[in-house]
Image (cartoon, rainbow, N blue to C red):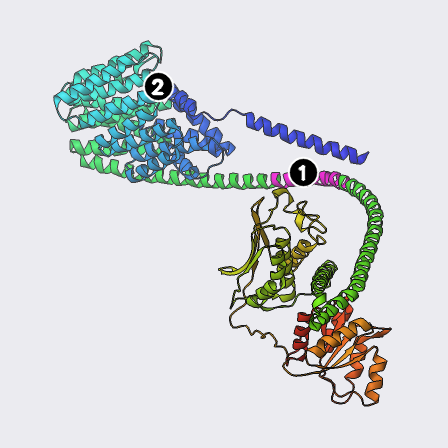
Amino acid sequence: MEMRLRFRMVLVTALTCLHGLALAASEAPFDAAAWFSERRAAAYQDLPREIATTRTQFQQAQRAGDRTAMKLWGGWYLKLTASRVLVADLKSVYDAVAADVTLPSEPKDNAAQVSALTGLVRYETANRDLAKAAEHAAQALRLADSSPVLVAEAHLSLAVARLEEAQSSAATAELVQAKERSMDEMQLIETRILETHAALYAAASTDELRRVTDMAREAQADMNARRLPWAAMAFVEWEANALARAGRRDEGLQRLLEQQRALARDGMDATPLVAYRVARASELALALALAYRSSPKGSLCAPEVRGPLGVPDIAGARISMERLVVLCRAAARDPQAIPAIRALEVHAKGPIATGSAAIEESLWSSIASAYALVGDFEDAHRAALQYRRASLRRVGEANEVARAEIESRYQVTEQRRENEELRSRQAIEEQRRLFMGAGLGILAVALLIVAVLLRIQTQQRRRLALTSAELAQANDRLTSLNASRSRMLAAACHDLRQPAHAIGLLSEVLAHADAPSAGGSLQELRRAGAVLADMLDVLIDMTQLESDRYEPRIAPVPMGELLLEVQAQFTRVAERKGLMLQVDAAENLWALTDRHLLRRMLFNLTSNAIKYTQRGRVFVRCQATPDGLRVEIEDTGVGIPPEKRQDIFSEFVRLDALRESEQGLGIGLSVVARAARLLGLSIQLESTVGQGSTFSVLLPRAPDDLAVEPAPELPSRSLHIVVMEDDGAIRGAMCKLLAAAGHTLHDYASPSALQAAIDAGELPQPDLVISDLHLAGANGLDAIGRLREQPGWQHTPAILLTGDLAGRAASRAAEMGVLLAYKPLPKRRLFETIARATAPAEGSAA
C-alpha cells in the first residue's frame, strides 16, 4: 500500500511539473514592437507624465532586483530625459543601466539590452562622449539583428550620435536604414523629426532653410497634432530654428508661442509654461533668449517668464529660463541686467537651489558670468567662489549617492545570493525526496521484473535441459548410425579391395604371359579390374573426407606430370568411346596444394566428362593467371540444366541422360566438392544443354624458389624384396609380376614364417619389404618392426598394403617411416610406390 502511495505521489509530481511547463510555454512572449510603440505614443501625447511613469517603473524594478525591467525602463528614461537640463538623477540612472547592460537573464532581455544601449547612446551623446556612444550604438545594432523594430531603434540612436558629431549625411544614411526596417508609426514620426534636424544642420542657404521649414510644416500636416502634441511641438521647434537662421526670429518665436497656447487650449495645463513642462523648458528658454537678443525690449518674453510656480520642477524651469534671460541682458549691457542678476542670486540662495547642488552650481556659474559681462569683477569673483563651493557640494553629494547606491546594490546582491542559495537548497531537497520516492518505486518495479524474469529463466532452463537431452540422444543415434555406415562402407571396401587387387595383379601377369587365345578376355578383365579399382579409390577418398580423417599435405605439385597421369589414365577410355582426349602438358607450372586430393579431383572431373560425352572431345588444360593457376576440363557432352547444377555435387546423384549406359556410383563430383572445401578451392561451372560443360578450378601457384622433390625414377637394379601376404593368389600374382621385372622375391604367408627364415639364416638382408596390414591374426606393421630389429636392418624400406580406411594404421605407418598404399594397386602405381620407397628421401601414403 505504501509503495502504491509513493508511486501516486511521483505521478502527481510529474503531472504538476508537466502542467507548470505547459503554463510556462503558454505565456505570451514579450512583444518588443508593441512595447516601444506604446511608450513612444505616450511620450508624444504627454511627455512629462511619461517621464514620471518611466522613472517610477525603473525605481520599482531596481528595488525588486529585476535587471531586465531595469534595462527596459532605465534605457527609455535616459532617452526621454538625456537632453533635459533639470533632471538631477540622470547620472545615477546611467550608471545603473551601464552596470547591468552586460547581464542577460530572460528571453525578452534582447529587447531590454537594445533599450538600455540606445538610452546610453542618448546620454553619452548629450554629454559629448561620442566615441562611447558610437560603440554602444554598434553593439545595439548587433543585438537587434533578428528584429526589425529593434534594428530601427539602433539606427535611430546612431543617427542621434551622428547629428551630435555634425555629420548630417551619415545621420541621414542611418535614418534611411531605420525607415527601411521600421513598420511602426511612432518610429516613423521620430524618424521624420530627426530628418528635419539633419536637414537643418546641412542647410547652408536661404532656400535650403525654406525647404526645412516646408518639411516641418508638411510633417505637422501629415500627423494628428491634437493626438500627439509633443511630436508636433518638436516639428515647431525645428521650424522656429530654421526661421531664426533665415533672419525671421520673431516669426519663429511666434510659431513656438502659438503651439504653446494650442497645448493650453487642449487642456494640457492651465498656463503655457506648465503645459510646456520640464522636457522642453530649456529649448523654449533658449528660443526666448534668442528672441530677446534680437528684440531688446523683450516684449515677447515678459508674459512667458512670469507664471505660477506649481511644482519644484516647474520652479526650476522658471529659474533656468530667468538665468538664460539674465545672461542675455548682461551680454547686451541692458540697464536691467544688475537687478536681474541680484534677483537670480536670491534664487541661488533659495530652497530650490539649496535642495539641488546641480541647480545651485548652474545658477552661481551663470551669476559669475553675468557679473563678468557687465564688468563687476569683484562680484564675479564672489560668485565664482560660491560656484566652486556648490561644485564641491555637488561632487560630494554625487559620491555619497554613488557610495549608498553601491552599498545598497551590494546588500541587494548578497540578499539575492542568499535567497538563491536557499531556494537552490530547497529545490535540491525537494528533488532528492522526489527522486527517492521515484527510486523506491522503480526499485519495487525492478524487483518484480527480476522475479518474473528469474521464473521465466528457470522455466526456459528446464525446457532447454529437456531439449538438450533430446538433441543429445538424437545426436548419439545419428553418430552411431553414421559410424555404423562408415564401418560398413570401410568393411565393404576392404572386402572388395582384396579380389580387386588380385584381379589386377593376375591380369598383369596374364598380360606378360602373352597368351594370344586369351587376348580379348584378358583386356576385358583388365578393364573391369581398373573400373573396380577406380570405384574403390573413390569410395576410399569419400570415406576419409566424410569422416574428417584426411589431413592435407600442402606441397609443390608439378602440373605437367599430373596432367600426363590424367592422359595416361583416360586416353584409352576415351578412345573406346570414339572421343578425343586432348591434354595440355602445362610444363614448368607448379601448384601449391595436396597432390593426392588434386589428382583425385582431376581424375573424377575427367572421368565424369568422358562418361557424359557421346561425340566430340574432352579438353584438359592448365593455364597461368594473375591469381594463380586455372585448370579447366571442357567437354562437348550433354550439358547440365541450370536447376541441376547444385544437385550434381551431392552423393549418389547422376543425370538422367545416359544413366543406364554408363558405369559409376554417382559420388565422383561429391568427392570433388568435399576435396575443394578441404583445400579452400572454388569450382566454377559453365554449361549449355546440348553443347557441353566446362569445370574450372583456381589453384594457388607455388613460389619459384620453393624446393621441389623430383619424381622418383624406377629402380634400374634388381632388388631383394620380401613379400608378406596371407592371400595366396595375391601373393603369387605379385611375386610373378615383380619377378618379371627382374627382382628377387622372398614371399611368406605370415610373420612367423618370415621369422623362421631369418632364424635359419635363409633370408639375406632385403632391399625392400612389402607387407599386407592384416596377416592371419598378425599385424604387418608389427612384422616390419621385428624385421628391422635385425642388426643392420634398422633402415630397411617398407611398403604397407591395406584395404582398411582407418586412420590409425596410417598414423602409425608414418611414425615408423613406412610407405602406405591402398588396395587395389595397379602395376604402374605399384612400381611407382617401390621407386618412392627405395629412393633416398622418405615417402608417405601413395
- Residue type at mark 1: give it: Glu
| Nearest to the observer: residue 245 or residue 299 | 245
Q: What label sits on residue 295 in the rendered view?
A: none
Q: Position of residue 184 (x, y in %)?
A: 36, 21
136 is higher (above) or lower (below) than 42: below
10 is higher (above) or lower (below) than 37: below
In terms of image quadrants, where is residue 327?
top left
Marks 2 and 1 sit apart, C-alpha to C-alpha, by 50 Å
Residue under circle 1? 430
| Nearest to the observer: residue 484 or residue 69 | 484
Image position of 50 (left or right of 777): left
| Nearest to the observer: residue 509 or residue 477 | 509
Q: Secondary structure at mark 1?
A: helix
| Nearest to the observer: residue 821 or residue 646 | 821
- Please tell me how many numbered marks the rendered image carries: 2
N-terminal label among 2 and 1: 2
Q: Secondary structure at mark 2?
A: helix
Q: Residue furthest top?
A: 265
647 is higher (above) or lower (below) than 501: above
**Which residues fall within the magenta stretch?**
423-444
Residue under circle 2? 185
Classified by dominant secondary structure, the portion drawn in magenta counts as helix
- Residue type at mark 2: give it: Glu
